[in-house]
Amino acid sequence: MLEVFRLEFMQNALAAGLLASIACGIIGTYVVVKRIVFISGGISHTAYGGVGLGYLLGISPLLGATGFALLASVIIGIAGLRLKTSSDTIIGMIWAVGMAFGILFVSMAPGATPELMTYLFGNVLMVPKSDVYLMVILVMVIVVVVVSLYKEFFAVSFDEEYAAVLGLPVGSLYLIMLALVAMTVIILMRVVGIIMVIALLTIPPATARLFVNRMVPMMVVSVIIGVVTTISGLISSYALNEMLGKPVPSGPIIILLTALVFILSLLSKKMFAGWYVVKESNSNV
């Protein structure tokens, strides 16, 4: 199987998968701890409008999606902070409007759009090197910002009121966090697609949270889970391609493997907890 990664498209896929694992491990931890999964879904689906705009203008759809995702994160953040309207209403509206723009722009774009489905459902095997370079830049920005504002993000994630008492700019930090979520969504889009971004953004951190409570260890474990499932998904996808003689998307396989890791982790934790309780009760007797 190691011979598989001698192919250039598999090297691009591996690089994209590793970058996505780093991004979702770091930012996904904040998404799970702060419980903003629905906001992440709104941002990811709004990004489809940018994909359509990219096709219409003849530029990289990933670049267009980045602009739309960042704009959506700002709108959702400001609306949640200042408007009296329910944030769920705003997110749902942004979600629908972004998808509507995407469909409209794609229908107006000249020529065929053969790669459109890869943005919806993901196909990391088709990631070009130019997208890998953009993903590298986004991951570098995410890492630098998180390292620089780690203490501030930590305070805002667990207790916004206490963070405000400390004099921290809670609103600005919240907007920056949503912008980082938007960048992560763009990275994950090429790996698992817009439809399944939420899964890869939340399942690894949720799995890590079963075993660790501290923020940094949770991020590290999340990244490790993402790396293992991504590499396993790539190898499985390539093997199925060879076996069946037709393309098998790697995105769904990666998601299924990630979900399997979560289920097995949950079962093992419950079994261990039950064994520990029985052992303690027997020792007391």
Image (cartoon, rainbow, N blue to C red):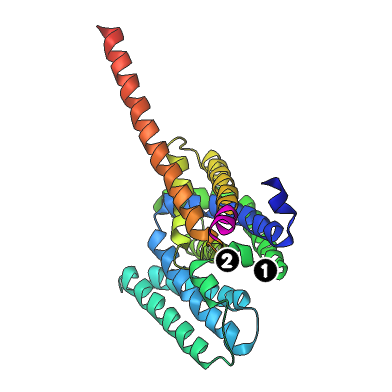
Residue 131 in view (yes/no) = yes
31 lies left or right of 273: right
Residue with the mark numbered 1: 131
In this view of the protein, which residue sits in the foreground, 269 or 124?
124
Amino acid type of the residue that numbered disc 1 sits on in the rendered structure: Asp
Up the image or down, 42 lies above or below 143; here it is: below
Q: Are marks 1 and 2 in contact (CB under 8 Å)?
A: yes
Neighbour tally class for label 2: few under 14, some 14-19, many 20 plus, Cα within 10 Å: many
The x, y position of residue 7, in whole percent, is 73, 58
Residue 152 in view (yes/no) = no
Residue at 45%, 79% (x, y): give it: 98
Up the image or down, 94 lies above or below 270; here it is: below
Secondary structure of the residue carrying numbered label 1: helix
Neighbour tally class for label 1: few under 14, some 14-19, many 20 plus, Cα within 10 Å: some
Of labels 1 and 2, earlier in sequence is 1
The residue range painted magenta reads 237-244
The x, y position of residue 264, in whole percent, is 41, 38
Query: In terms of image quadrants, where is residue 270?
Result: top left
In this view of the protein, which residue sits in the foreground, 235 or 130?
235
The x, y position of residue 266, in whole percent, is 38, 38
Residue at 54%, 47% (x, y): give it: 229
Amino acid type of the residue that numbered disc 2 sits on in the rendered structure: Arg
Give the quadrant of the C terminus. top left
19 lies left or right of 204: right
> Main SS of the magenta segment?
helix
Q: CA distance from mark 1 to mark 2?
A: 8 Å
9 lies left or right of 86: right
Residue at 52%, 93% (x, y): give it: 108
What label does residue 190 carry, if any? Answer: 2
The x, y position of residue 195, in whole percent, is 44, 67
Secondary structure of the residue carrying numbered label 2: helix
